[in-house]
Amino acid sequence: MEINSLKYNPQIYHRRSIRLKGYDYSQQGAYFVTICCQDKNCLFGDVVNAKLVLNDAGKMIERWYLELLNKYPDIECDAYVVMPNHFHAIIMNTGFPSIVGADLCVCPKEDCPENNPVCPENIGNGGYGFGNKEGEHTGSPLRTVIQ
């Protein structure tokens, strides 16, 4: 049986969608995303002397969040925080090419830099979303939730 043929059954899985019915999540806007560890397990790090110390898994979450812009050029990665058992981020859909569901790592010719968004010649967003220190950005009110 194919995985795609399995239907979601809330009676079995005891989950429900929190998506707004009828809302087009591919449209431009800022999206507040939270990803939680199963059973609230602290898999990303520990709190030591009132400070979070990320472990390898937590560092991986942070590294891949910052890599999203290279994979999906139609987004901006804004404020984020990795916690011991969850992750919060603000991802802005800028609406530049519509690639919802597409994987940009697929390139017809591997040696063709103009077709490969992760090629060093194509990387660069003018600093948006990376390295923002607290208080540097005053756009989205969602940022105050993370700060």
Image (tube, rainbow, N blue to C red):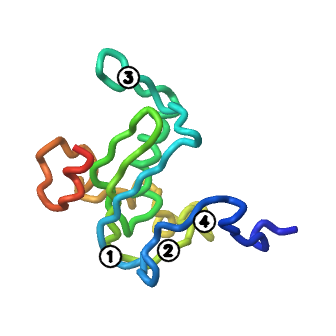
Left-right relation of 145 to 45: left
Q: Nearer the viewer, residue 125 or 44?
A: 44
- Amino acid at pointer 2: Val
The residue pinned by badge 2 equals 100
| C-alpha gap between disc 2 and disc 1 | 12 Å
Q: Which residue is mark 4?
A: 106
Whole-number angstrom distance, CA of label 1 to CA of label 4: 24 Å
Q: For mark 3, what is the residue?
A: 47
Vertical order, 18 against 127 (above or below): below
The part of the image, by quadrant, that contains residue 147 is: top left
In the rendered image, the quadrant that contains the N terminus is bottom right
Question: What's the CA distance linking mark 4 and mark 3?
Answer: 39 Å
- What residue appears at the point 42 percent right and 48 percent down from the top-left corner? 65
Q: Earlier in the sequence, mark 3 or mark 1?
A: 1
Q: Circle 1 is placed at which residue position?
A: 28
Residue type of the residue flagged with mark 3? Val
Report the residue that reaches farthest toward the top.
49
Above or below 20: residue 140: above
Looking at the image, the residue that sits furthest to the bottom is 22
Q: Residue at x 59, y 67 (%)?
A: 107
The earlier-in-sequence mark between 1 and 4 is 1
* Residue 1 vertical position relative to residue 21 in the rendered view, above or below: above
**Image coordinates for residue 53, horizontal then vertical, percent:** 39, 23
